[in-house]
Image (cartoon, helix red, strand yellow):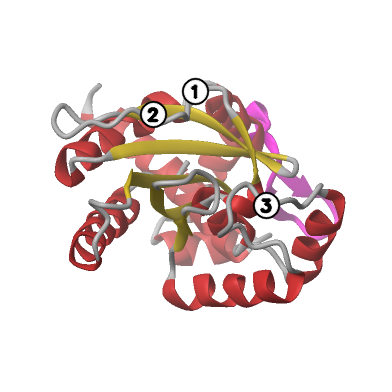
Amino acid sequence: MDRNNIRSVKRTLTLMEILAQKGESGVTELSNAANLNKATVYRQLNTLLSMGYVKKDEKTERYGLTFKLLELANHMLNHINMRDMIRPYLENLAAQSGETVHLVQREGVHCVYIDKVEPTVNSVRMVSRIGMRQPLYCTAVGKAILAELPDAEIHSIWDSIDIRPHTENTIVNWGDFIKEIGTIRSLGYALDNEENEVGVKCVAVAIRDYTGMARHAISVSAPVSRMTDSNLEKILRYLLDTKSNFPVT
């Protein structure tokens, strides 16, 4: 691509960015904001109008973006495979922690395991498997996701689930559970202290997507004997670092 074409593309994208930030604007406003002469702005806007990315209010002669950009974004998102994109991060987390790592996705009042990575050393087989469904209330991943929701929505989910103990540590009282949610919110992570499976302890964090919603969570699971306070602190550091480096999905 020659320099003139590159310059033209940059100008077009600059105008679109300004319209996205400022909303509907006139040619003079756009000219000043983009540091372009009005003739150039007119030319770029006419191209965007012809392609449907910009609309013009004939009464005010102001320009604004259409929803075509959102259509493009939605098409792009349809081709993103969450599991494939995050898999390298899960593999690295499993290697760092030496423990089993899970990725789950919320489906209604359940979480579904959509990926699982076991370490090459110290591996202890878990009952979890890809495709397995678990209630949100008794897993670290589920509680991490729930903690991102308003209390009223959590209560609605709680009322719609058959609350029963999976182990003697499962929280089955609403008052105790909402206190647990408050703790998760203050700490930034959730723990499953043998609440779903005897002998297994998990720590999890929720993952927000590009809309700000938390539909996924990742966890590190280990036998209770290995999830000591010092090891948990180390694993948690790896987990939070992994979360902070995730791409926006």
The answer to which quarter of the image holds residue 10 is top left
Residue type, numbered disc 1: Ile
Q: Give the range drawn in magenta.
A: 49-68
Gap between marks 3 and 1 measured at Cα: 23 Å
Quarter holding the N terminus is top left
- State if disc 2 and disc 3 touch (CB < 8 Å): no
Magenta stretch encompasses residue 65: yes
Seen at 46% across and 41% down, the residue is 12
Quick one: SS at disc 1? Answer: loop
Q: Is residue 157 left or right of residue 76?
A: right
Magenta stretch encompasses residue 149: no
Residue type, numbered disc 2: Lys
Q: Which of 76 and 9 is in front in this view?
A: 76
Residue annotated with mark 1: 130
Mark 3 or 1 closer to N-term? 1
Seen at 49% across and 60% down, the residue is 31
Q: Between label 3 and label 2, give the one nearer the viewer.
A: 3
The picture places residue 75, in percent across and down from the top left corner, at 60, 25
Residue annotated with mark 3: 165
The answer to which quarter of the image holds residue 87 is top left
- State if disc 1 and disc 2 touch (CB < 8 Å): yes
Residue annotated with mark 2: 116
Q: Nearer the viewer, residue 182 or 19?
A: 182
Residue type, numbered disc 3: Pro
Question: How packed is label 2: few (under 14 Cα within 10 Å), some, or many (20 or more)?
Answer: many
Gap between marks 3 and 2 measured at Cα: 25 Å
Mark 2 or 1 closer to N-term? 2
